[in-house]
Amino acid sequence: MELLTGFIIGLFGSFHCIGMCGPIALALPTGGGNILFGRILYNFGRILMYSALGFLFGLLGNRIALFGLQQILTISLGVIILTLALMPHKYKSVIISGTGFYKMFGIVKSSMASLLRKHNKLSLLGIGVVNGLLPCGFVYMGITGATALGDASKGMMFMAMFGLGTLPVMLGATMIGSFVNLKIRAKLVKMVPVFTVILAAIFIMRGLNLGIPYLSPKLADKMTSVKEEIICH
């Protein structure tokens, strides 16, 4: 269920985020060889970075869960997603500008520009890796999901599926440009807030520990498990 959720977030996100990544995709160097292979390398780099982020944030979620805070974490992440989805854009900009986010974004853009000037296969892989660090609301949603899973390997797989979900649209964009009809994309973008609210509700319900299979399963008390393991030894 979690892996399918990651794939769906990536699929929806690819339609929304192609506006940012589309120009990068069109500006990709040929890599001095087979164009398709080069584009696959670029997209593999993105998925590699997403997987690494999933591992790191899944590990973070695991550390939090060990203190018996997984329910609080999952509900809090759902509330954060819901708040950001409903918050007016001008307030989001104020929050982002106060976190030093734009400075980090500048470093990412500078690295991207440097790699775009090179014309080899390794640079295409590097562009994909750096691309995975570009600011994107759907990537942050994916990271939130990886954190809520409370497991490094599950977080990595969740974000790998997220990356695979973006693959059809992004690979198409790198090969033949923005092939998605603008009217269709506009309709999909309008669905983004609805999808975001549903996702936030799922996180909140999951954290409420209602015992509903798949939707809100009983969360294992990892702190108790750790204590039992210590007692046994």
Image (cartoon, grey):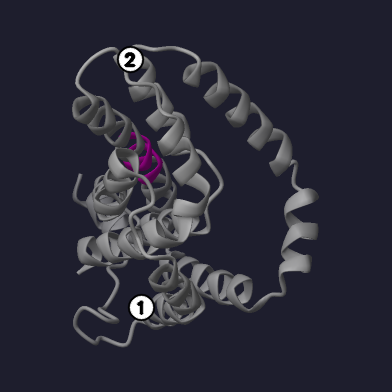
Residue 74 rendering spot, x and y as whole percentages: 44, 69
* Residue identifier under label 1: 206
**Label placed on residue 167:** none
Residue drawn 39% across the image and 12% down it: 119
Q: Is residue 8 left or right of residue 15?
A: left
* Residue identifier under label 2: 122
Residue 127 rendering spot, x and y as whole percentages: 42, 27
Q: Amino acid at mark 1?
A: Arg
Mark 1 vs 2, N-terminal side: 2
Mark 2, Cα crowd under 10 Å, few <14 / some 14-19 / many 20+, is: some
| Residue 152 visible to an observer of this rendering | no
Of the pair 75 and 23, the residue shown nearer to us: 23
Residue drawn 39% across the image and 83% down it: 205
Viewport quadrant of the C terminus: top left
The span shown in magenta is: 48-55
Q: Is 165 drawn above or below residue 171 in the view shown?
A: below
Residue 67 in which image quadrant:
bottom left
Residue drawn 44% across the image and 47% down it: 60
Residue 110 rendering spot, x and y as whole percentages: 62, 24
Q: Amino acid at mark 2?
A: Leu
